[in-house]
Image: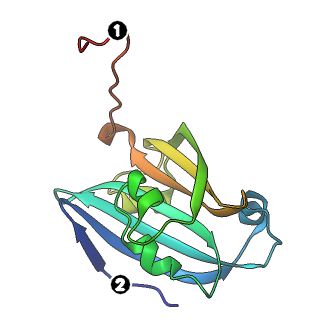
Amino acid sequence: MKEFDNIFIDKDATRVKVIEALITKADELTAHKLRIGVGERTIRIKRLLIRDGDPIFYHKEQIIYDPTRPVVEDELEVTSLHGLFVGARETTLKWGELTIEVAALSTEEADVLNTVQGQPAFRLEHIFYDLEDKPVSWGQFLCRGDRLKFTTKVGISKEI
């Protein structure tokens, strides 16, 4: 696999810019998260989700390398969190853990999101598990703090 230069996938109003997709070796953190040995092969994907010309999410992900699965092809079609589960093909994911926390953007992350280092951001970390409850991917979506808003309703619904 190779790095990608300016590849865009357009799904409705969201564009995806693939920054990197390559086979690499798991470092200690990746190995721990994916329950594999340090140095085992993984696929590293970095992409930017863009809406209305504005960078919204920077997604970095490590996936356990499996030469029998079209992992990169499936992943490149994902433009939403929902898409991580349904994708374009039959899913092999059973469940996942999602953690949302506040973070300060690194220089790399700030550059990709068109802002400054240290900018407050939301980090949505994910670990997805296969049908045998083994982790298959680990990554994070990063969103500038001024670009994300959560809204929910509480209490008794007006609908009966």
What residue sits right under mark 1 in the picture? 156
Q: Which residue is mark 2?
A: 5
- As measured in the structure, the alpha-carbon distance from the residue carrying label 2 to the one carrying label 1 is 50 Å
The C terminus lies in which quarter of the figure? Answer: top left
Residue 112 or residue 151, whichever sits in front = 151
Report which quarter residue 34 is drawn in. bottom right
| Mark 2 or 1, nearer chain start | 2
Task: Decide which of 116, 138 is in the foreground and name it.
Answer: 138
Q: Secondary structure at mark 1?
A: loop
- Count of numbered badges drawn on the protein: 2
Name the residue at 72% across, 56% down: 133
Can you tell which mark lies on residue 69? none
Q: Residue at x 47, y 69 (%)?
A: 90
Q: Position of residue 82 (x, y in %)?
A: 40, 52
Measuring from the top left, give residue 5's x and y in whole percent.
35, 84
- Residue 131, located in which quarter of the rendered image? bottom right
Q: Is the residue marked by circle 2 packed among few (<14), some (14-19), or many (20+) residues within 10 Å?
A: few
Identify the element where label 2 is drawn. Answer: loop
Q: Position of residue 129 (x, y in %)?
A: 65, 57
Q: Quadrant of residue 18?
A: bottom left
Asked whether disc 2 touches disc 1, contact meaning CB atoms under 8 Å apart, the reply is no
